[in-house]
Image (cartoon, helix red, strand yellow):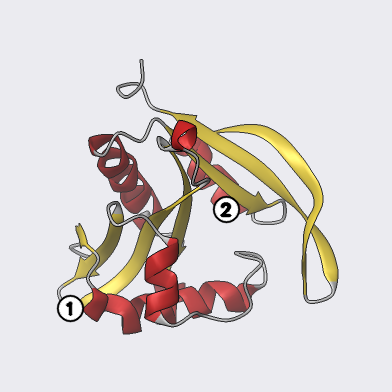
Amino acid sequence: MGAWTIEAMRESDWPAVSRIYRQGIDTGDATFETAVPEWPEWDSAHLLHSRIVARDGEQAGGWAALSPVSRRAVYSGVAEVSIYIAEEHRGQGLGRLLLAALVKESEAHGIWTLQAGIFVENRASCVLHEKAGFRQVGRRERIGQRDGRRRDTVLMERRSEVVGL
């Protein structure tokens, strides 16, 4: 693995972030989305904190960010995880590094529960989340449609051991 550093995502990272996101979309097993949004749309859908990029020099190898699960105040400490790794860096431990950093960053901002909805076929993502302390809390059958096919997702969550106790 390269000399990765984890840094806060900047708007200037969007070309690299969107390229990596596109690679994830193209797998067909990373998201229900089929198109990469423009920066303003992506920016407004994600929390302002807990947006990180893994860099090796100027190269971005992956990114992670949080989005709110609800606008209701009672859920202000709950967020949904997005994590994407560039094709050329998958399977090398970068996902573990990014997800661990995202957990730490989220806790620094008062997030007590992280959740992830993962296609059941995406075993690598399920294993990654399990290694980061997530547990499967359910399976959502035919919850959404992608490319004309209804898909199941596994709902995983991680409760903080330091926030909200």
Q: Nearer the viewer, residue 100 or 155?
A: 155
Q: Amino acid at mark 1?
A: Glu
Residue 107 in sight: yes
Q: Is residue 1 visible?
A: no
* Quadrant in the picture for residue 8: bottom left
Residue beneath the point at 67% across and 72% down: 28
The percent position of residue 114, horizontal first and vertical second, equals 46, 39
32 shown above or below 15 = above
Q: Amino acid at mark 2?
A: Ala
On the image, which quarter does residue 56 sit in?
bottom left
Q: Are marks 2 and 1 in contact (CB under 8 Å)?
A: no
Label 2 CA crowd tier, 10 Å (few <14, some 14–19, many 20+):
some
As drawn, which residue projects farthest toward the top?
165
Give the mark toward the camera: 2 or 1: 1
Q: Residue at x 44, y 75 (%)?
A: 41
Q: Residue furthest left?
A: 57
Residue identifier under label 1: 58
- Is residue 149 shown left or right of residue 114? right
- Secondary structure under tag 1 reads loop
Vertical order, 148 against 163 (above or below): below
Mark 2 vs mark 1: which is more N-terminal?
1
Dot label at residue 14: none
Task: Give the spatial CA distance, label 2 vs label 1.
Answer: 27 Å
Q: Residue at x 43, y 71 (%)?
A: 42
Q: Position of residue 124 (x, y in %)?
A: 57, 53
Q: Which residue is mark 2?
A: 124
**Residue 59: x, y in percent?**
24, 77
The count of marks equals 2
Relative to 3, 119 lies left or right: right
Q: Is residue 142 left or right of residue 102?
A: right
